[in-house]
Amino acid sequence: MYVMGIETTCDETACSIVENGKQILSNVISSQVELHSEFGGVVPELACRKHVEWILPVIDQALDEASLSLAEIDLIAVAKGPGLIGPLLVGIHVAKALSLAIEKPFIGVNHIEAHLYAAYMSHVKAVNFPAIGVVISGGHTSIVRMDAIGEYNLLGQTVDDAIGEAFDKVAKMLGEGYPGGPCIERLAQEGDPLAYPFRGGQVKGHPLDFSFSGLKTALLYAIQRHLEQTPGQLSFQTKTNLAASFQRAAVEDLLKKVLLAAEQNHCHTLLFGGGVTNNFYLRQRFQQELPHFKQLWPAPFLTLDNGAMIAGLGYHQFLHQKKGDSFEMAPLHRMGFYPS
Ligand code: KG4
Ligand code: ZN
């Protein structure tokens, strides 16, 4: 079965063709990072316009690279949320129009679940369920118990910023560019992770939930103290120490909560998804601290937003629900995991 996956939740216009849920025939991603970097974050209206401009060329290229014609596609999967409504509408309308034109079904897919599917499709071996799914992206920080593909129990999530968002905001505070995650990781390589005693936030009564606002404030106060003592700019060494200490605190917090979730749910397999999985220090810490767990990380080209994970998950969802979605399907700004 050839599935086309369309992804326009945020600032990537992406389309991929995937055969039978795993075999990636093409994976085209047009990123708008440069466009938004001058504003220090994604501007929804600009993102929308770029999606409109790029979606058809990206789809054409995905078909070309897969050496398939539109008529050979069996199913069109599209990210229906969570994400920015304008950008989502572009992908959804295109998916519906293509579905009408070629008389094939379309299906709406949850973008966060798809990030976990990216880890699944990156590995040949079967996954032993139940497993713990860890979504760490620019918009989400969630820990779920996965009983099968499409069956999840939400165990913990952030009550304020997502972890990637915290990296982005801290980078901005340090005068670095967007996206902030890679900038922080680079700075942190030169710094002392123990220079500042930062810690991740705890949510009373919810040991698996996350809060990054306290950590961000601690960093802000540390910056202000430095600037009071030495007005002007932060020194390079101060910046690297702040970045390394922030990164350590965020990663240790995640590590501790993922381990607790795995122990409480008797899971020995961990699946990771989302842009923050690009962080090498984070992967290394998990591999050092949890060597007895089977850890499934997404392939580098599937960490950020992409159409392949949408097509892959769409395939499974279609087999499960045995039909496509109706034309009433609407985009969702917020969207939870499907419960088991
Ligand atoms: O998965 P993604 O495209 O976002 C959402 O779907 O929401 O991931 C983007 C996020 C950004 O916040 C970016 O700063 C972060 O992933 N990121 C990183 C790294 N590379 C990207 N965070 C930490 N370290 C990195 N190397
Ligand atoms: Zn994403």
Image (cartoon, rainbow, N blue to C red):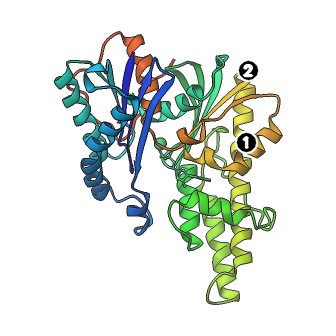
Drawn side of residue 88 relative to residue 337, left or right = left
Q: What element carries label 1?
A: helix
- Establish if 259 lies above or below 55: above
Tell me the residue at 23%/35% (across/down): 94
Drawn side of residue 94 relative to residue 163, left or right = left
| Nearer to us in this view, 142 or 116 | 116
Q: Crowding at label 1, few (<14), some or many (≥20) Cα neighbours within 10 Å?
A: some
Residue 191, percent from left and from top: 76, 67
Q: Which amino acid, by three-letter code, is at mark 2? A: His
Q: Is mark 2 on a helix, strand or loop?
A: loop
Q: Distance between the residues labelled 2 and 1?
A: 16 Å
Residue 241, percent from left and from top: 74, 69
The N terminus - image quarter: top left
Residue 57, percent from left and from top: 28, 44
Q: Crowding at label 2, few (<14), some or many (≥20) Cα neighbours within 10 Å?
A: few
Residue tagged 1: 255
Which circle's residue, 2 or 1, is located before the other in the chain? 1
Q: Does the residue labelled 2 lie within 8 Å of ligand 1?
A: no
- Establish if 276 lies above or below 315: below
| Nearer to us in this view, 49 or 203 | 49
Q: Which amino acid, by three-letter code, is at mark 1? A: Leu
- One can see residue 213 in this view: no
- Establish if 302 lies above or below 19: below
Residue 234, percent from left and from top: 66, 81
Q: Quadrant of residue 199?
A: bottom right
Q: Quadrant of residue 167?
A: bottom right
Tell me the residue at 64%/16% (across/down): 126
Tell me the residue at 41%/11% (across/down): 319
Residue tagged 2: 266
Q: Does the residue labelled 1 lie within 8 Å of ligand 1?
A: no
Tell me the residue at 60%/54% (across/down): 212
